[in-house]
Amino acid sequence: MQLQLSRLILSCVLASFVGVSAALPIDGNALGNVIARTAEPPLLPLARRAMSGRQPRHLRSDYPSKVKRDGPDLGGIATFNGDPQPIRGPLGDTFLSASNHAIDEQNIDNLAVPPTDAGTCYTELEMEHVTLAHEALRCRLAKAFSAVEIRISANDDRELHWHRMAEWGYVLGGSGRITAVDEDGRTFAADIHGPTNTSDATIHYFPPGVPHSIQALDDGLELLLVFTYGDFDEVGTTFTVADWLARTPLEVVAKNLGVNVSVLAGIPQKDPVLFKSTVPPPADISQEIVTSPAGTVPMPFFFDLNTQNRTVAPGGGGWLKVQDSATNFPVATEFASVLINIEPSSMLELHWHPTDEWIYILSGQGRATAYAGATNARTFDFQEGDTAVFPMGYGHYMENISPTEPLTFLALFNAPRFVDFSATQLLALSPPPLVADMLNISTETVTSLPKEKQFIVA
């Protein structure tokens, strides 16, 4: 049976070759050349598809270009001799109804759009009329962060609690004390403080699930808290001890704690969140620390920015301080942070990151354009207290638009290590002829570009 099957297969193979040789108008030599692969190189996949009538589709569709580079408008901030208007050069027209000019002045680039903005995430100025149809909600927003500012009065406390995501904190003002206990019963306590004219603030980090408390000292405390989850108000995000015990049968709580039920009658039935200390925290932190048989945590949950040297930009124009678990803040495995100071009229260079970036403006005035790829870009203006997200991969810069005041802001990343890519460095380290042809510039210009990251350009 096996022999018969083998003969059948061989017969089919021979019949196939006979059919081919009979159907093709080529002689034996030509067939030999084909078999020996001495003929023309075979068509590649895209060419074969094109010949079959299936046209290859580019990954990027044909987007109508809205970038206008022919005129003298180079994309700077529009200026006005009176109240801001949706006018830029010959485009746009004045408001015919009332407008909040104070808001307009803070968002000039949203009102008088630079010609480089384009795509589905921008406001367009057209000849003779204005289209104020903001489509920012159609842009992809990062869902990796949520943030809250919390003000705690002097000697008040934020109750014992924990989160299912990591918490990162920066002291905006005042002073306070944070405590925590890890999964092994090791304790942590530290005093935290805000920035002054001569010193930087402290930051802290609590991993997911680690219970902690926050106390305000004599001058009160204001904190910026950032979390690695976009919907902080979602149920199951924050867990508080007092609320948990109030939601558990009192007999169970008493049995668990090994106390009489009567001593637990005063447990608050409404989650206190913040409460006044009956005994103000002592000035000496050592008097408040509870000694644990397991000792203290091996990696502190806070970092004093005063202990860190500034990294000054090579060309001047400002400095930065980077904190991440890979270099100097080992416990902060889910947050990398950067404190950035840009001098007047200087700018953070064109760059991008492999993760989402969340920023908070501490002081000054800034301007940035976010490039979202595929001819989509949008320019934004920033003031103190503003926040923004540059999603993963979005090209951007940050310019200090004040001629006299520095711009200081925080940049946070949901990552163990701070990583950025420099546009200038990329161009300088790529083959000069390639870059010259791509940008239609001379190779001399390409070879003159700095090969090291500039970070900040003066």
Image (cartoon, grey):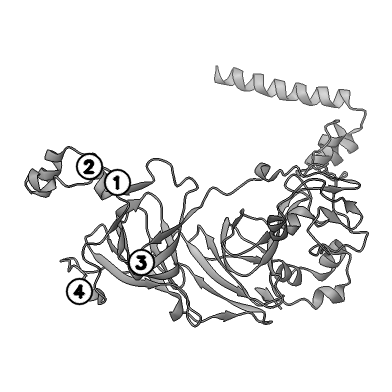
Spatial distance from mark 2 to mark 1, Cα to Cα? 8 Å
Spatial distance from mark 2 to mark 4, Cα to Cα? 30 Å
The residue to which callout 2 is attached is 246
Between residues 154 and 24, which one lies in front from this camera angle?
154
Between residues 314 and 174, which one lies in front from this camera angle?
174
Mark 1 nearby-residue class (10 Å; few <14, some 14–19, many ≥20): some
Q: Secondary structure at mark 4?
A: helix
The residue to which callout 3 is attached is 301
Q: Nearer the viewer, mark 1 or mark 4?
A: 1
Query: Where residue 11 sits in the image (x, y, percent)?
Result: 71, 20
Residue 158 in the figure: left or right of residue 53: left
Q: Image height check: is 203 above or below 3?
A: below
Spatial distance from mark 4 to mark 3, Cα to Cα? 20 Å
The residue to which callout 4 is attached is 287
Residue displayed at 47% across by 49% down: 229
* Label whose residue precedes the other's in the sequence (4 or 3): 4
